[in-house]
Image (cartoon, rainbow, N blue to C red):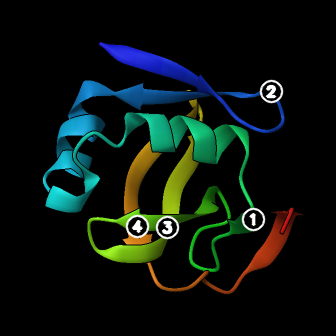
Amino acid sequence: MEFLLEDYRGKMIRLTEERIRHIEEHFEMNDFEAHVRETLLVPQAVIRSNSDIETSLYYRYYFGTRIGDKWLCIVVKDDEGGPFVLTAYFTNKIKKGEVLWIDM
């Protein structure tokens, strides 16, 4: 089973059950779905990955997560089947790369 989530451009992003299980292996990412939806739809920054031009990093800052105030990073890969969520994690800073979108 997979879900379709809309991003800030109106593009539909796939999120599979397998990827959800992968993401939820990290305790701080349990019950993350609402944050993933919000981060894709209303990101504060979107950066093209320096290591893979088909991958974009969507960022939104969250206060009071289980591990403190952090950026949520949603990693979206665009392949022949269209864009899909590869993984998601909390981080202290935004990675360097080509800025595709900024709203801070």
Tell me the kind of residue under disc 4.
Answer: Gly
Q: Where residue 103 is drawn, which disc sits there?
A: none
Q: Along the horizontal axis of the image, is 103 left or right of 56?
A: right
- For badge 2, the amino acid type reads Gly
Q: Is residue 26 visible?
A: no
Query: Does label 2 or label 1 sit earlier along the sequence?
Result: 2
Mark 1: give few (<14), some (14-19) or many (20+) Cα within 10 Å. Answer: many
Residue 66 visible, this orientation: yes
**What amino acid is at disc 1?**
Ala
Quadrant (top left/top right/bottom left/bottom right) for the N terminus: top left
Q: Secondary structure at mark 4?
A: strand
According to the picture, the residue beneath numbered tag 4 turns out to be 64
Q: Are marks 1 and 3 in contact (CB under 8 Å)?
A: no
Instruction: Report whether 67 appears left or right of 37.
Output: left
Q: Height in image: 13 above or below 88?
A: above
Q: Position of residue 64 (x, y in %)?
A: 40, 67
Q: Separation of disc 1 and disc 3 at Cα?
A: 16 Å
Q: Quadrant for the C terminus, please.
A: bottom right
In percent of width and height, residue 62 lies at 52, 63
